[in-house]
């Protein structure tokens, strides 16, 4: 078949397409452009779907955290009251042994501790522990023959955590190590 015959057949096919659809047959450049557009929109759709899935997961996590830590501000306000109550309780223990008021205060202290425990609050006991800036706030340092360097000598104020989130760091004195001779 000659080149002239092939060109004639291609023109005849294009003319037939034009007569059936009412539009001229697309040439190779238009087809490539349409394919690129299709690929681009397919990629855009996949990215949009992935973004939506990430948003849905993030929203679920945020909702879970909001439920989990809903009482955090209430508990943050309650803890200083608990500190003052514990100070009063320790003062009452030194003043009068086995008085009915002391027994009542001890019962209230136990109820408060139980309430906080049920709410997911745990006290941070730092005495003797290695200093951790994520849980402890160093108020000072002192030399100690008994406590190794970098460990907590004593705790001045309790720290508290709500589940896995720190509500208040423990105020501590950290050991410098053995005193110089």
Image: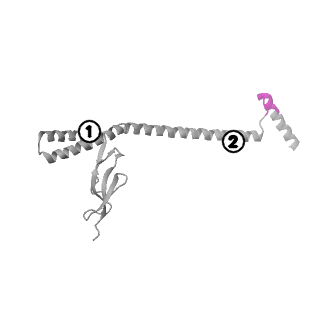
Measured as percent of width and height from the top left, residue 103 is found at: 14, 41
Q: CA distance from mark 2 to mark 1?
A: 64 Å
Q: Residue at x 34, y 52 (%)?
A: 136
* Residue 2 visible at all: no
* Image quadrant containing the C terminus: bottom left
Which residue matches tag 1?
A: 115
Identify which residue is drawn at 14% across, 46% down: 95
Q: Which residues are magenta?
A: 15-24
- The quarter holding residue 36 reads top right
In terms of sequence position, does the residue under pointer 2 or pointer 1 come before the other? 2
Label 1 residue SS: helix
Q: Could you say which is closer to the camera, residue 97 or residue 64?
A: 97
Q: Position of residue 16 (x, y in %)?
A: 80, 31
Residue at horizontal 34%, vertical 49%?
Answer: 169
Question: What's the residue at 80%, 31% (across, down)?
Answer: 18
Q: Nearer the viewer, residue 35 or 106?
A: 106
Q: Main secondary structure of the magenta part?
A: helix
> Can residue 140 be found in the magenta stretch?
no
Q: Which residue is mark 2?
A: 36
């Amino acid at each position: 078949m000659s080149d002239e015959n092939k060109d004639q057949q291609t023109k005849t096919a294009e003319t037939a397409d034009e007569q059936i659809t009412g539009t001229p047959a697309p040439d190779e450049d238009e087809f490539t452009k349409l394919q690129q557009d299709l690929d681009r929109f397919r990629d855009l759709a996949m990215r949009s779907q992935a973004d939506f899935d990430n948003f849905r997961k993030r929203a679920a996590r945020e909702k879970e955290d909001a439920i989990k830590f809903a009482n955090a501000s209430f508990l943050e306000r309650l803890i200083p009251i608990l500190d003052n109550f514990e100070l009063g309780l320790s003062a009452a223990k030194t003043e009068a042994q086995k008085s009915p008021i002391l027994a009542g205060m001890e019962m209230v202290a136990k109820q408060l501790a139980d309430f906080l425990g049920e709410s997911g609050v745990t006290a941070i006991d730092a005495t003797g522990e290695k200093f951790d800036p994520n849980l402890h706030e160093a108020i000072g340092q002192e030399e100690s023959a008994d406590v190794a360097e970098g460990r907590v000598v004593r705790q001045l104020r309790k720290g508290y955590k709500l589940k896995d989130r720190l509500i208040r760091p423990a105020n501590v004195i950290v050991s410098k190590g053995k005193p110089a001779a």
